[in-house]
Structure formats: structure tokens, C-alpha cells
């Protein structure tokens, strides 16, 4: 097991914690991380783009002009894709881009992402982050004391004051341990774990 320092909100070391090797010391495979991140980004796509085909465009019930004698090409409907305002040929339709990667691969990728943060020395464990009031200034002071910028903060339970104090700070995101994902871990420079959330992650990833 790897020993990791535990800090308080003033950036002072208060204790140490053992990090399980099965989670924080696994081989990091880039292609596995890429596969899971690509899945997450694909699942976030709206897929709501749409265009009307010739059967959906308004109008076109009457033949625009007579068949012969005009010198023009034959036309049976104003909804033809050749006409301005007509339908679109093979236009896009609403669709889902979502797909799934096996659960075992997703779980392993999460372990790899956590291991990567530990190896890069950008993993910070804090004993608690309970704020008495909603105060953005106080939250910024805490982040400065922890020397963390562009951080993902993982909490073990609902901390309303913390979540409200951090929402207007750029480059910071607060998530609960059950919502932790590979994309967010890799997106932010620092990963801040509350000490209780470490135990929750171990229970989730070792089950």
C-alpha cells in the first residue's frame, strides 16, 4: 500500500492514509483510457440535428406548371430537392450516439485514472471540507492553501455550503464519489479526495 499525506483546509498535514494498490497502483494503459473517454463524450452528444425530406416539406400538392410547351424541365412538385425550399436528400435525423464499454473495462479505466493522478503527484487527500457558511472567498482561500488549481473535488456526501461556494469559481468542479468518472479525472489538473470518499471508492471499485 502507498502512504498518502492527509491535509486540513489550511494546507497543513494532519495524518496519513493507506491507498490500496489494487486501485492506486495499477498499470496505466492509454488505449483503455481513450476508449472510455470516447464513450463518455459520445454519450453526451445531443444528436438532435434534423432536416426535412421532400415528404416533410410544406407545399408541393400542385404541379408547378404544365408538362409541355414551356421549354423548361418537367417538374411535378415544388418539394423536389432540386428546388429552393425543397426537401433535403438523405438529410440528418435525430439519433443517439451512445454506446457502452464493458463494465469491467470502465472500472479498470477508473483505477488507471486514479493511479495516474497519484503518479503525477496531483492527488490531494483532505480530512474534511465542511464550510460553516456559503462563502466563495473562503473557498478560494482553501484552494490556495492546498495549492490546487483546476481541481476536481470528490466528496462523500452532500455538502451544500461547499457546492454553493465553489460553483462560481472557474476551473473547479465538485462531484460525489458515486458520480466520479474517467473524463473528469483526466480533465482537471488536481484531484482532491475527502478522506471518507477514499473509503467509498475502495468499496465501489473492489466489489
Image (cartoon, rainbow, N blue to C red):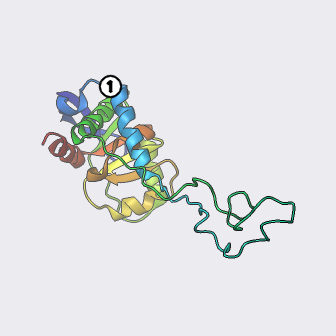
Q: Could you say which is closer to the camera, residue 149 or residue 72? A: 72
**Residue 130's quadrant in the figure?**
bottom left
Q: Residue 111's x, y, as percent?
A: 26, 35
Q: Residue 108's x, y, as percent?
A: 25, 34
Q: Which residue corresponds to mark 1?
A: 29
**Residue 22's quadrant in the figure?**
top left
Q: From this viewpoint, is residue 29 visible? A: yes
Q: Residue 74's x, y, as percent?
A: 76, 61
Q: Could you say which is closer to the camera, residue 46 or residue 121? A: 46
Point out the image quarter for the N terminus. top left
Query: In the structure shown, which secondary structural element does the residue marked by tag 1 occupy?
Result: loop
Residue drawn at x 56%, y 60% is 50
- Answer with left or right where residue 18 lies relative to residue 183: left
Q: Residue 171's x, y, as percent?
A: 50, 47
Residue drawn at x 38%, y 50% is 98
Q: Could you say which is closer to the camera, residue 107 or residue 146? A: 107
Residue drawn at x 24%, y 39% is 107
Amino acid at each position: 500500500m502507498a502512504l498518502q499525506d492527509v491535509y486540513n483546509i489550511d494546507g497543513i498535514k494532519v495524518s496519513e492514509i493507506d491507498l490500496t494498490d489494487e486501485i492506486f497502483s495499477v498499470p496505466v494503459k492509454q488505449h483503455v483510457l481513450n476508449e472510455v473517454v470516447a464513450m463518455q463524450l459520445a454519450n453526451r452528444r445531443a444528436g438532435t440535428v434534423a432536416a426535412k425530406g421532400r415528404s416533410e416539406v410544406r407545399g408541393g400538392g400542385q404541379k408547378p406548371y404544365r408538362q409541355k410547351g414551356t421549354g423548361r424541365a418537367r417538374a411535378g412538385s415544388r418539394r423536389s430537392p432540386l428546388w429552393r425550399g425543397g426537401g433535403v436528400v438523405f438529410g440528418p435525423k435525430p439519433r443517439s450516439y451512445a454506446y457502452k464499454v464493458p463494465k469491467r473495462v470502465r472500472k479498470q479505466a477508473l483505477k488507471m485514472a486514479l493511479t495516474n493522478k497519484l503518479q503525477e503527484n496531483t492527488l490531494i487527500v483532505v480530512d474534511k471540507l465542511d464550510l460553516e457558511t456559503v462563502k466563495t472567498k473562503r473557498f478560494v482561500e482553501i484552494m490556495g492553501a492546498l495549492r490546487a488549481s483546476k481541481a476536481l473535488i470528490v466528496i462523500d456526501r452532500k455538502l451544500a455550503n461547499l457546492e454553493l461556494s465553489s460553483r462560481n469559481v472557474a476551473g473547479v468542479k465538485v462531484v460525489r464519489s458515486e458520480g466520479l468518472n474517467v473524463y473528469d479525472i483526466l480533465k482537471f489538473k488536481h484531484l482532491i479526495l475527502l478522506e471518507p470518499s477514499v473509503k467509498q471508492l475502495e468499496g465501489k471499485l473492489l466489489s
